[in-house]
């Protein structure tokens, strides 16, 4: 006569429940706890609080002028209108938003490229090479991070003026190309890379430059992409410096140009929100398409000093 299989139940306060029948073990997931649902609801509420201003900005940009200033404010345009975008993007108008947009794209893109190049070239010796005073140089680079950027406005203005770059995009591209944060960020990433890769390259006859360009930089793509995005975002959102060095409307960047739009249309909230939406689109798209590189670059750049 066949004996029934012995069933052994293993219970855990934290993990799942396991039932062992003979030689087989079946794992049963515990019922979802109330605490997990409460945590999910709390995170959803916090996320909604953070994105609600963005949602309201987008909604307001599709309102009419009267609806945008209505009291109390509404979350649904009534009626739905593209008047703000038609006004702000009209060719030959007083608000050349498309020109400001193009200027910001050119300035932020070139500045991000320069930051990545200079930071990589400066960070690699600090991470891998041995020379006298290396720790002092790195300490000075870190110390510059403690200097408020507003202190450098007057010295940079005098330098840009002597170079003849006032009222040109070079004034907002070149001065911030040497980034102390970029050097620190790239150095932290280079330190994480296995030294055996460089030793193997030297055994094969590669010099320092070939090792740096053919071995190290291809592995540093996540860090370079992250740094490029951060530099792009910093230059794209910069307001104070372009106001000081750019005078003509045709060379203004988007943040500085939108400030004049606000002063000229103090109550045209629909126009202001439409301009803000246009300024937000490139940044959102960059984060969406580069989030994988950002996560990988940040996770591997801040572990070891």
Image (spheres, helix red, strand yellow):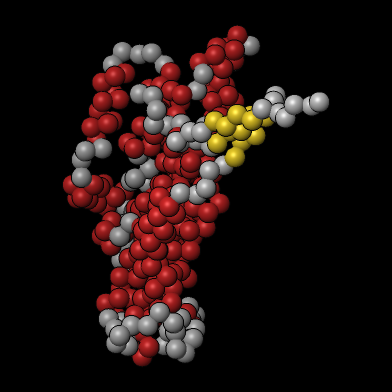
Relative to 299, does residue 113 appear above or below in the rendering?
below
Residue 26 in the image: state x and y as whole percent.
65, 34
Look at the image and tell me in which quarter the N terminus lies: top right
- Along the horizontal axis of the image, is 51 left or right of 22? left
The quarter of the displayed image where residue 137 is located:
top left
Q: Quick check: can you spot residue 169?
A: no
Question: Of 13 and 169, which appears nearest the observer?
Answer: 13
Counting from the top left corner in percent of width and height, residue 68 is at 36, 84
In the image shown, does 230 or 73 lie closer to the viewer? 73
Residue shown at the point (60%, 40%) measured from the top left: 28
Q: Most extreme residue toward the top, as rendered? A: 203
**In this rendering, does residue 292 appear at all?**
yes
Q: Residue at x 53, y 54 (%)?
A: 288
Q: Is residue 147 left or right of residue 48?
A: left
In the rendered view, does 16 fall on the left or right side of 25? left
* Residue 305, above or below 244: above
**Which residue is depicted at the point 38% across and 24% down?**
304
Seen in the picture, residue 59 relative to 126 is either above or below; the reply is: below
């Amino acid at each position: 006569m066949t004996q029934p299989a012995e069933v052994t139940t293993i219970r855990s306060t934290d993990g799942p429940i396991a039932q062992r029948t003979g030689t087989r073990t079946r794992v049963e997931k515990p019922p979802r706890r109330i605490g997990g649902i409460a945590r999910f609801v709390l995170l959803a509420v916090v996320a909604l609080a953070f994105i609600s201003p963005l949602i309201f900005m987008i909604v307001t940009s599709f309102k009419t002028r009267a609806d945008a200033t209505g009291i109390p404010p509404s979350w649904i345009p009534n009626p739905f209108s593209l008047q703000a975008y038609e006004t702000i993007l009209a060719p030959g108008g007083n608000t050349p938003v498309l020109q400001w947009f193009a200027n910001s794209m050119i300035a932020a893109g070139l500045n991000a490229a320069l930051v990545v190049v200079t930071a990589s070239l400066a960070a690699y010796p600090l991470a891998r090479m041995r020379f006298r005073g290396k720790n002092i140089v790195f300490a000075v680079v870190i110390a510059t991070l403690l200097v408020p950027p507003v202190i450098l406005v007057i010295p940079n203005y005098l330098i840009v003026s002597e170079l003849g770059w006032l009222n040109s995009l070079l004034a907002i591209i070149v001065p911030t190309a040497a980034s102390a944060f970029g050097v620190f960020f790239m150095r932290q990433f280079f330190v994480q890379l296995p030294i055996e890769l460089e030793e193997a390259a030297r055994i094969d006859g590669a010099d320092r430059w070939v090792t740096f360009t053919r071995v190290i930089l291809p592995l540093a793509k996540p860090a370079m992409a992250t740094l490029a995005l951060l530099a792009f975002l910093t230059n794209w959102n910069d307001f104070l410096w372009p106001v000081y060095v750019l005078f003509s409307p045709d060379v203004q960047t988007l943040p500085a140009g939108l400030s004049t739009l606000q002063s000229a249309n103090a109550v045209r909230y629909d126009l202001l929100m439409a301009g803000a939406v246009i300024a937000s689109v490139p940044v959102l798209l960059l984060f969406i398409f580069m989030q994988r590189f950002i996560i990988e670059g940040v996770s591997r750049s801040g572990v070891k000093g």
